[in-house]
Amino acid sequence: MKQVAVITGAARGIGLATARKFLAEGWRVVMLDIDGETQDRAHRELNDPDNTLALQCDVSAPDQVATAIDAAVARFGRIDVLVNNAGIAIFSPVMETSFEDWSAVLATNLSGPFICTKACVPAMLAGGGGSIVNITSISGTRASTLRVAYGTSKAALMHLTKQLAAELGTQGIRVNAVSPGPVDTAMAKKVHTPDIRADYHDAIPLNRYGTEEELAEAIFFLGGDRASYINGTVINVDGGFAATGIGLASLRGAD
């Protein structure tokens, strides 16, 4: 029986690229996204109805998640990997960030992975184990302006990853995280001005943004058996951004 991956936020971007990667490797994929129309279009474009299932779902709503996971198990009989990718970003100064905005970001970015994990673990245990990959962000490691809610949610998700790894690892379920740096997603293209993009290029040793496909490769690796002794780890996929300090642009100019 083919292995099954559940991917949240699968309608576009890193989530959709990850769905393509798992399918290309012979897995079945359950796509969850709050944007049902966009996800249905992506599902049709994948053109693999026997191995895919697209379900509209708000990951911050426990009842919706439970219904979706029940449908996934009913269709494919098992869950081997959960990719907690769904996330939202509201970028604003702290004094202009409403409590509603704060709550919405944490509900999706932190509570969502908690809810989805609890929903998927029983099916994983029934199959003898599994793997969970949480998608965090470099913003959870390096603070910057306008990200009080987003950065805090991703930092908390990193620690949730470790908490889950410590507890679920004893039951055969590995939990790790991928922390993207700047990636050419639709979200980045929408909010990153040319000046911001230039600043990122100056701060990244590889001197470029990453691609969605590069993130999907790392996610697939952590989800699969080749990462069988990796648990409780956050892997930066960021071109070296988290590893560096200031001065890269000056050093390049001196070359």
Image: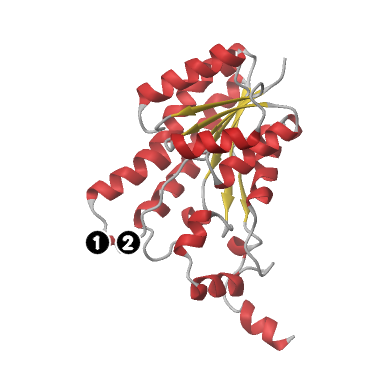
Indicate the secondary structure of the residue bearing disc 2: loop
Mark number for residue 96? 1
Q: Quadrant of residue 243?
A: bottom right
Q: Is the residue under label 2 in contact with that under label 1 (CB below 8 Å)? A: yes
Mark 2 highlights which residue? 92
Callout 1 amino acid: Glu
Q: Quadrant of the N terminus?
A: top right
Residue farthest toward the bottom in the current orientation of the protein:
254
Asked if residue 75 is positioned above or below residue 46 in the image, the reply reads: above
Q: CA distance from mark 1 to mark 2?
A: 6 Å
Which residue occupies 57% across, 14% down?
75
Determine whether the residue tagged by mark 1 lies in a helix, strand or loop: helix
Front residue of this view, candidates 174 and 88: 88
Q: Which amino acid does the dot numbered 2 rest on?
A: Ser
Q: Residue at x 70, y 44 (%)?
A: 217
Residue drawn at x 59%, y 22% as measured from the top left: 170
**Crowding at mark 2 (Cα within 10 Å: few <14, some 14-19, many 20+):** some
* Residue under the point 58% across and 33% down: 43
Q: Is residue 233 visible?
A: no
